Image (spheres, rainbow, N blue to C red):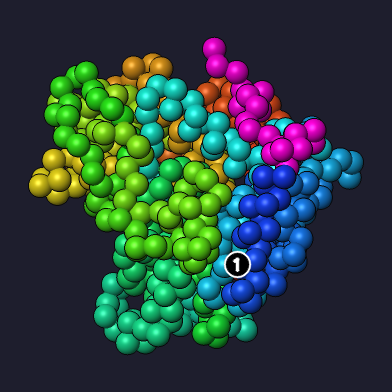
């Protein structure tokens, strides 16, 4: 049996390794010089807590080298923070004792295009010896990706970002654009704003694949190119904070909450992923995988020539976590493997045996994964049948009502663009927990040589309840309590998270359930609308 993630040491900065400290310090000073030339004064160093809120500590750019080598002090109490900033007292978190060090990742150091004078870097949370903190979700993604790499497999992943905008200054929600769903009218209303979102993301080294109005009034979506899972989770944070900043500069307020109006359509946080390897034994056609999937499900082209996370080729900080210097930003990444194992096979929907097992592992654990991917009481106000939220635990070929949608891509791509979309998640989630949970669930499906049930080719809600039962189509949890119960009972996620993280996630979720026990939907939405 594979040991828990918290017991598998990731790379660490040793207090006794002078050579490594010197190397990191030199790289940080080099990066700081280029930031200073661009007028950067401070670096926002961020992590996402178990309630899905991005927290930060900032350092002056001149102190970046010290932060990278020695870390920035931070209490582990943030593990127990709730969405309302209340602190849950749990077995492994919530007290005043202890300290962690936040180590900024130079590979993702980015000058923020919409916040002049600021740069951003995600952090690894470590203890005083340099060992990963047991509740560092970012390190958990790294560990799960390494486990898959041990089987010769890589995952390409992207998060869809949906948000709604209202005029700044009010706590209620009045949409800032009222044009038709997906309508060009909204571009006439907020075209300058949408242009500036794309411009800012591109200047930050990201590859924007598409942007468009969504279904609800004032709602939009942006899709970026696929990356490795850790890069995708980092990028999810960067995109959200960039959109938030651009919105503010346009006199708007952005919400990524599952619901902004109790009776409206919510914001999703769909995840797209593909599985890549160097060959398949069940009859995969061996087509060379030349393009990565993006959140639109089609092959992503290469990133902009010379684009970097800092937008300066002299520095060239990578956004894929390869090296601190000299690598370009994401784009056209296919997981490092030759074959896309979600296409070109002889299984259902063109899946290979390996791809089917990985997908089946995710499908089997979707109820438990909901505690990670739909982590708020408000999440279950969004998860309504027949609203394309994926409320049923089933899969289907291009079925937008199935929680797990298989997208084969255009036939001309010969399976290279095939990917899975997980539709039941939202952006209240910690993207690192989501990415790690999906990898662990898929890996369990590989271990079990799992197989998918028959696909569903209709809206499951349209079926007679007896027919749904006959076909084994069950609703996903309809409230956060049911999701937490499934999560606490799931041995795969318990082993992957380790005891401290697994227990704390459940404790934070239960605290939110208690917080909103007597609240009606409108009160829940009002309390969470501007928290995400």
- The quadrant holding residue 365 is top left
Whether residue 13 is in magenta: the answer is yes
First to last magenta residue range: 1-21
Residue 68 in picture, x, y percent from top left: 71, 50
- The quadrant holding residue 438 is top left
Residue 156 in picture, x, y percent from top left: 37, 42
Q: Is residue 115 rendered to the left or right of residue 453?
A: right
Residue 527 in picture, x, y percent from top left: 64, 64
Q: Secondary structure at mark 1?
A: helix
How dense is the environment of label 1, judged by Cα within 10 Å: few (below 14), some, or many (20 and up)? some
Farthest top residue? 1
Q: Is residue 279 above or below residue 455?
A: above
Numbered disc total: 1
Residue 428 in picture, x, y percent from top left: 55, 54
Q: Nearer the viewer, residue 248 or 37?
A: 37
Q: Is residue 382 rendered to the left or right of residue 12?
A: left
Can see residue 393? no
Q: Main secondary structure of the magenta part?
A: loop
Q: Is residue 481 above or below residue 522?
A: above
Quarter of the picture containing the C terminus is: bottom right
Q: Is residue 296 rendered to the left or right of residue 270?
A: left
Residue position for label 1 = 34
Residue name at image x 62 percent, y 50 percent: 105
Whether residue 257 is in magenta: the answer is no
Residue name at image x 17 percent, y 29 percent: 286
Residue name at image x 32 percent, y 42 percent: 334
Quarter of the picture containing the N terminus is: top right
Q: Nearer the viewer, residue 497 or 402?
A: 497
Can see residue 357? yes
């Amino acid at each position: 049996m594979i040991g828990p993630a918290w017991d598998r040491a990731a790379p660490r900065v040793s207090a006794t390794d002078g050579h490594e400290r010197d190397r990191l310090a030199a790289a940080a000073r080099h990066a700081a010089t280029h930031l200073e030339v661009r007028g950067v004064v401070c670096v926002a160093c961020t992590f996402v807590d178990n309630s899905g809120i991005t927290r930060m500590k900032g350092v002056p750019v001149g102190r970046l080298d010290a932060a990278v080598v020695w870390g920035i002090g931070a209490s582990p109490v943030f593990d127990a923070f709730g969405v309302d900033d209340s602190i849950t007292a749990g077995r492994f978190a919530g007290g005043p004792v202890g300290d962690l060090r936040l180590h900024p990742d130079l590979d993702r150091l980015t000058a923020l295009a919409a916040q002049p004078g600021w740069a951003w870097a995600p952090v690894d949370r470590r203890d005083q010896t340099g060992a990963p903190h047991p509740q560092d979700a970012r390190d958990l993604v790294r560990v799960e990706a390494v486990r898959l790499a041990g089987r010769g497999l890589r995952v390409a992943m992207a998060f869809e970002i949906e948000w709604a905008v209202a005029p700044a200054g009010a706590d209620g929600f009045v949409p800032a654009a009222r044009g038709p769903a997906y309508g060009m009218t909204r571009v006439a209303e907020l075209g300058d704003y949408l242009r500036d979102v794309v411009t800012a993301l591109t200047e930050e080294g990201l590859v924007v694949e598409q942007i468009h109005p969504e279904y609800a009034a004032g709602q939009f979506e942006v899709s970026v190119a696929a990356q490795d899972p850790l890069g995708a989770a980092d990028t999810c944070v960067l995109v959200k904070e960039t959109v938030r900043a651009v919105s503010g500069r346009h006199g708007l307020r952005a919400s990524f909450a599952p619901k902004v109006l109790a009776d409206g359509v919510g914001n999703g946080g769909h995840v797209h992923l593909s599985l890549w390897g160097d060959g398949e034994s069940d009859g995969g056609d061996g087509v060379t995988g030349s393009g990565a999937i993006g959140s639109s499900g089609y092959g992503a082209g290469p990133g902009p020539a010379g684009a970097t996370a800092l937008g300066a080729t002299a520095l060239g900080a990578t956004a894929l976590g390869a090296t601190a210097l000299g690598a370009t930003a994401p784009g056209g990444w296919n997981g490092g493997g030759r074959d896309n194992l979600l296409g070109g096979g002889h299984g259902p929907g063109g899946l290979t045996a390996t791809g089917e097992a990985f997908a089946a592992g995710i499908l089997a654990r979707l109820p438990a994964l909901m505690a990670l991917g739909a982590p708020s009481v408000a999440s279950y106000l969004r998860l309504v049948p027949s609203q394309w939220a994926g409320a049923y635990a089933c899969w289907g070929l291009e079925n937008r009502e199935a929680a797990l949608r298989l997208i084969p891509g255009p036939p001309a791509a010969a399976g290279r663009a095939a990917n899975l979309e997980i539709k039941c998640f939202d952006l209240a989630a910690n993207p690192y927990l989501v990415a790690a949970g999906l990898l662990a669930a898929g890996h369990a499906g590989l271990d079990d040589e799992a197989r998918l049930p028959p696909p569903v080719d209709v809206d499951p809600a349209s079926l007679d309840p007896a027919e749904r039962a006959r076909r084994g189509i069950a609703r996903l949890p309809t409230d956060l309590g049911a999701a937490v119960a499934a999560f606490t009972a799931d041995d795969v996620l318990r082993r992957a998270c380790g005891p401290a993280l697994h227990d704390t996630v459940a404790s934070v979720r239960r605290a939110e359930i208690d917080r909103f026990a007597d609240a009606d939907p409108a009160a829940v939405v009002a309390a969470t609308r501007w928290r995400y």
